[in-house]
Image (spheres, rainbow, N blue to C red):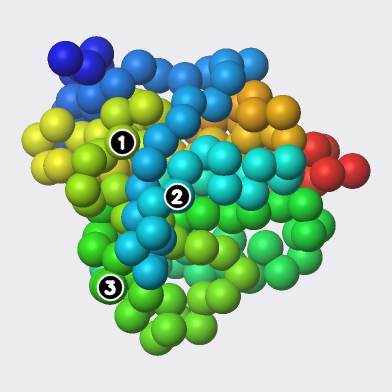
Amino acid sequence: MPVERHGAVTLKGKPLTLLGSALKVGDKAPDFKALANDLSEIGLDADSGKVRLYLSVPSLDTAVCDAETKRFNEEAEAFSKDVAVYTISCDLPFAQKRWCGLAAVNNLKTLSDHRDLSFGGAYGTWIKETRFLSRAVFLVDKKGVLQYVEYVPEVGEHPKYEDVLGAVKKLTA
């Protein structure tokens, strides 16, 4: 049974429980298995040797997740080729693919954690009450070590974009 973190985040002020341990900078990034849009399994080893930015979001069909993913898609255009960006949600891979096409998102990849919540459990973003992922950001260096971790305390709020972008810039300078 995964660790339960009662009240770790809120949604419209209502406390929610996150399943999985909270990660911190310096931790080894845990492995996971999620589905790409073509239904292939993707894990931490995808794009190994690159800096990896993982954006955990509840659903691409919500305003904040939509805006966040579009923002990081735009920012990713300026990133070094040594940076891979992923948005991970529990949306079905087909819905993610459709959303990316409609939103013209092509500088990042979407992954679905709907099947096993492997990412959510490993990264401590699985919301027990909704079976969605909470909003969080994880930056993994080329050696597989977490260099930036942000669990957004209110699920409906944006991450600290400038802090994330600064951390990416620092790792790729």
Query: Which residue is rendered at x = 67% and y = 63% of the image?
Result: 76
Residue 28 horizontal/vertical position (percent): 58, 19
- What quarter of the picture does the C terminus occupy? top right
In this rendered view, identify the residue nearer to me: 111 or 26.
Answer: 111
Query: Which residue is rendered at x = 61% and y = 70% of the image?
Result: 107
Taking the view exactly as shown, the residue that stands out farthest to the left is: 129
Residue type marked 1: Ser
Residue 111 horizontal/vertical position (percent): 40, 56
Residue type marked 2: Ile
Mark identifier at residue 118: 1
Label 2 crowd bin: few (<14), some (14–19), many (20+), radius 10 Å: some
Residue type marked 3: Phe
- SS type, badge 1: helix
Query: Which residue is rendered at x = 33% and y = 80% of the image?
Result: 98
**In this rendering, is residue 92 above or below 5?**
below
Of the two numbered discs 3 and 2 on the same chain, state the one appearing first in sequence: 2
Q: Nearer the viewer, mark 2 or mark 1?
A: 2
Labels 3 & 2 near each other (Cβ < 8 A): no
Query: Which residue is rendered at x = 28% and y = 73% of the image?
Result: 94
Mark identifier at residue 94: 3
Taking the view exactly as shown, the residue that stands out farthest to the right is: 173
